[in-house]
Image (cartoon, helix red, strand yellow):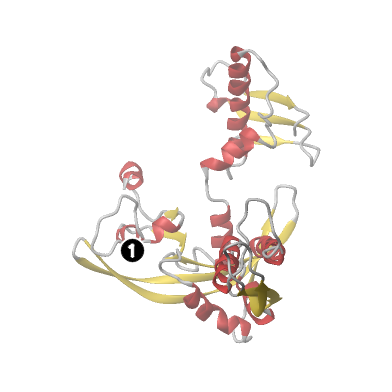
Amino acid sequence: MRVRETLLRNGLLYIGDCKRAALAEGAASLTATRGDVAAGGDYYLCPLPATQLNRDSLVGYLEPVWQGRQELTSVEYTYANGKTEEIAVGYELSVPRTTKLDGVSLAWSERQLVVRSLSVAKAGLKSLQTRLEKAQTALGELGQPRRGKKRLTQLEDWQEAAEEICQHYRVQGLLQLDYQVTTRERHLRPYGERPARVVVESMVKLSVNLDEAALEHQKKMLGWRVYVTNQPSQELSLQRAVVAYREEYLIERGFGRFKGFPLSLTPIYLQRDDYVKGLIRLLSIGLRVLKKVGVPGSPWRMLSNKSNCQDFILVIPSALLPDQRQNNCWQLFVKSPSF
């Protein structure tokens, strides 16, 4: 690994996404896997993907919780404004792990952290309710005639259309669909060369009801995820692991700050290209400042008497300045209405 070769040390914690969770058993990978990290004397922290932990396996982890046999640990997080809230609950268990790396067997002890994010569960519940409402509305309008749409007359057509709606809104198994088919005969009189005949018409009525048991089970599954790490609990507790993964460095967060709050690059009301380029370059300096302020233990310090950060002073030590002939420190006063 390039990081290990550059720092010439081990015992580091590598935090990554599901791609790092691969064991790379018998095959090389471009991304350092759990086996690679453990073999080098380092630690990893990553969530298990669905390929390694399917829904049925996750239910096995949650059954002791639902039955009240497993006690959960609360995880709290302190925000920048000093407010502390509970963000997650979970428990952990230890399992032996083995794999092969370059033909050599490797064994180590792995901790599995079964964690439920409260914010993810809340957002998932809101999304689930919205999707259920939209699916029920779409199913209720399924038999209404519309311009340019083929009218559904056969039971197979109704079932296919209803299945597409359930898949689109991801509510399979949560709705009970009851099809009632009635037939009637229409006697048509002869017309021209057409003889009199009897036509059998089918009418389909669809009743949609919520499967309360399946819905309750789906709600209990929301927000749960299993993370794995090989770092001992004395060095990385469950609470610290959740917070560390939450504060993982993501370059996308910088782009989010750049385009939205607090830098607010968009919308752009400038017409000249050189003005737009100058604005982007100016705000990029502010983005670097915000990134430095957000790093724990950074030598950059933000001093403020207001919690809303409308006015703040950024104190940069002289050691960070290219010109050592500057004063002991340089104070940059930032006053922006976008904060």
Residue at the disc numbered 1:
23
Name the image quarter holding residue 114. Answer: bottom right
Q: Amino acid at mark 1?
A: Leu
Q: Is residue 279 above or below residue 192?
A: above
172 relative to 105 in the view: left or right: right
- Residue 326: x and y in percent read 59, 17
Residue 146: x and y, percent? 68, 55
For the residue pair 223 and 249, the one nearer the viewer reads as: 223
Task: Identify the element where label 1 is drawn.
Answer: loop
Relative image position of residue 175 (x, y in whole percent)? 65, 74
Q: Quadrant of the C terminus?
A: top right
Give the residue at the far right of this rendering.
306
Residue at image x 23%, y 63%?
26
Estimate how packed mark 1 is, as few (under 14), some (14 to 19) or many (20 or more) residues with alpha carbons within 10 Å.
many
**In-image side of 229 versus 31 (left or right):** right
What is the x, y in percent for residue 71?
62, 80
